[in-house]
Image (cartoon, rainbow, N blue to C red):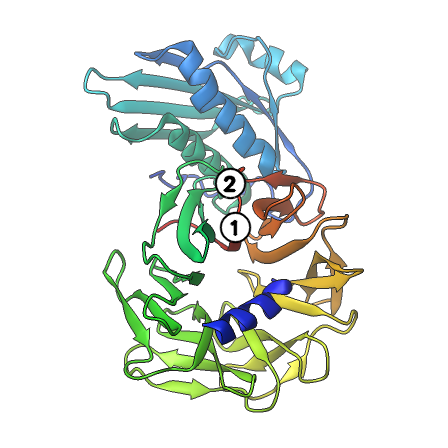
């Protein structure tokens, strides 16, 4: 988070969709080409056109547009087989037809199919069933994810969620969850204190720092949907604690432990035994750990050579080496889901911007630029976007960006946000 590198330490010191059956991949996940998808007006029984337009069609179009992989074409053309040629002439490569039926109970069934207009053959068919409490926009998310999965071989992230910290009152911060489109805000903790640094395990378990007892403690869940309990320290005081992060296998937490001299080190906690192990040992601040997807390496921020820089090491503390070479202040690393990139922030002229370091190239690329500050990068599950916080509209809010930095989208208007984490679901 950049300033989070400072703020965190000061704070410490102060106190349903189903997967497509087809296996053919039409477009690779790294291609820059866009498939043109013709979208007909959904046929519906038991639903009015206005509801479908705002809660389904508009949501589906936005979901697909934000992927950067599909260009949605909406023409006033019929969707029957006889109109395929007309859609093809209009530029559509695939033609999507959707039929919805709402039962008297409120339950909804949706049938979706896509046709290749050149080959005039079906490329996608799916049926979705939802009970009355499932919002119609969720069906749009599920369909978007499955269409992207059919196209690229990797499911989309329209139905994913973002977990983050939000200030609820002076001196009180809690952890919240929101859908990827900014809707469906849910509060996950209610400790009435500083609750910081959320981390989500692969199976959906939550871990975080809370000051509910006065001193910072690591709390979390030992099983999905289980109660929240203290992980560390198991007894007594644990000193200055921050930024717990689940290992990919969910068996360990990397975290930061500080001392009264102002130093801090990267630690790992084995959840089964409760044993903590120190990975770094020296004067200075070592903080903000992040795991690689194999769970055998960590990236972290350290000021061991002066200003904050990003370093790498093995999960036992060996083979320590510096990653970032340019810039005097680089921090807040976030390892990408496939392990090929590390996102981080760099300070220049008093503000922070997002960068991505491509490990295979040994080179960093700047993502954001401007007069505002961008902090706390975290990867989308499909590795196509980053979520981050920015003060570009005043207070700190959540944004997402593609890796070109040209498609920056504000997630929602609520403010006082920090430490976002992007997950498939929980």
Is residue 91 shown left or right of residue 297? right
Residue found at x 61% / y 10%? 86
Q: Is residue 96 positioned above or below 266 on the image?
A: above
**Mark 1 touches mark 2? (CB < 8 Å):** yes
How would you rate the neighbour count of disc 2 (Cα within 10 Å): few for under 14, some for 14-19, many for 20 or more? few
- The image's mark for residue 417 is 1
Residue 229, image x, y percentages: 26, 67
Compare residues 407 and 227 and report the one nearer the observer.
227
Residue 278, image x, y percentages: 47, 87
Residue 308, image x, y percentages: 68, 75
Q: Is residue 319 positioned above or below 346 on the image?
A: below
For numbered disc 1, what is the local secondary structure?
Answer: strand
Quadrant of the frame with the N terminus: bottom right
Is residue 183 shown left or right of residue 86? left
- The image's mark for residue 134 is none
Residue 361: name its quadrant.
bottom right
Look at mark 2 in the image and give the residue it sits on.
414
How would you rate the neighbour count of disc 1 (Cα within 10 Å): few for under 14, some for 14-19, many for 20 or more? many
Compare residues 293 and 180 and report the one nearer the observer.
180
Q: Is residue 47 positioned above or below 365 on the image?
A: above
Query: Which residue lies most toward the bottom here?
Result: 282
Residue 274: name its quadrant.
bottom left
Residue 84: name its quadrant.
top right
Residue found at x 76% / y 50%? 369
Residue found at x 55% / y 73%? 9
Residue found at x 32% / y 54%? 190
Residue 140, image x, y percentages: 43, 29
Q: Is residue 178 positioned above or below 255 on the image?
A: above
Is residue 60 shown left or right of residue 72? left
């Amino acid at each position: 988070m950049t300033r989070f590198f400072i703020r965190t330490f000061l704070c410490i010191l102060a106190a349903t969709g189903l997967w497509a059956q087809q296996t053919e991949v039409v477009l690779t996940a790294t291609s820059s080409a866009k498939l043109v998808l013709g979208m007909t007006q959904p046929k519906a029984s038991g639903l009015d056109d206005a509801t479908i337009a705002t809660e389904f069609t508009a949501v589906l179009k936005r979901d697909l547009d934000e992927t950067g992989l599909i260009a949605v074409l909406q023409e006033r053309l019929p969707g029957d087989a006889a109109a395929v040629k007309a859609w093809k002439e209009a530029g559509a490569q695939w033609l999507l037809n959707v039929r919805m039926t709402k039962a008297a109970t409120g339950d909804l069934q949706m049938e979706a199919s896509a046709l290749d207009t050149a080959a005039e053959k079906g490329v996608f068919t799916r049926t979705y069933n939802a009970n009355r409490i499932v919002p119609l926009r969720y069906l749009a998310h599920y369909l978007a994810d499955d269409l992207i999965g059919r196209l690229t071989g990797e499911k989309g992230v329209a139905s994913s969620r973002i977990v983050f910290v939000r200030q609820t009152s002076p001196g009180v911060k809690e952890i919240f969850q929101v859908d990827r489109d900014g809707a469906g805000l849910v509060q996950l903790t209610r400790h009435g204190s500083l609750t910081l640094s959320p981390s989500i395990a692969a199976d959906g378990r939550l871990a975080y720092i809370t000051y509910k007892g006065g001193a910072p403690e690591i709390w979390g869940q030992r099983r999905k949907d289980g109660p929240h309990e203290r992980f560390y320290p198991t007894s007594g005081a644990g000193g200055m604690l921050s930024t717990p992060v689940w290992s990919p296998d969910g068996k360990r937490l990397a975290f930061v432990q500080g001392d009264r001299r102002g130093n801090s080190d990267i630690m790992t906690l084995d959840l089964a035994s409760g044993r903590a192990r120190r990975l770094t040992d020296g004067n200075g601040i070592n903080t903000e750990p992040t795991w690689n997807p194999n769970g055998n390496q960590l990236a972290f921020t350290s000021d061991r050579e002066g200003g904050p820089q990003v370093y790498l090491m093995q999960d036992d503390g060996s083979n320590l080496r510096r990653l970032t070479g340019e810039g005097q202040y680089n921090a807040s690393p976030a390892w990408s889901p496939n392990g090929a990139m590390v996102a981080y922030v760099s300070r220049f002229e008093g503000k922070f911007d997002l960068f991505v370091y491509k490990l295979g190239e040994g080179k960093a690329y700047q993502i954001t630029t401007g007069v505002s500050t961008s902090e706390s990068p975290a990867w989308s599950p499909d590795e196509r976007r980053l979520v981050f916080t920015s003060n570009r509209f005043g207070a700190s809010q959540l944004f997402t960006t593609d890796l070109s930095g040209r498609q920056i989208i504000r997630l929602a208007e609520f403010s006082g946000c920090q430490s976002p984490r992007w997950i498939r679901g929980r």
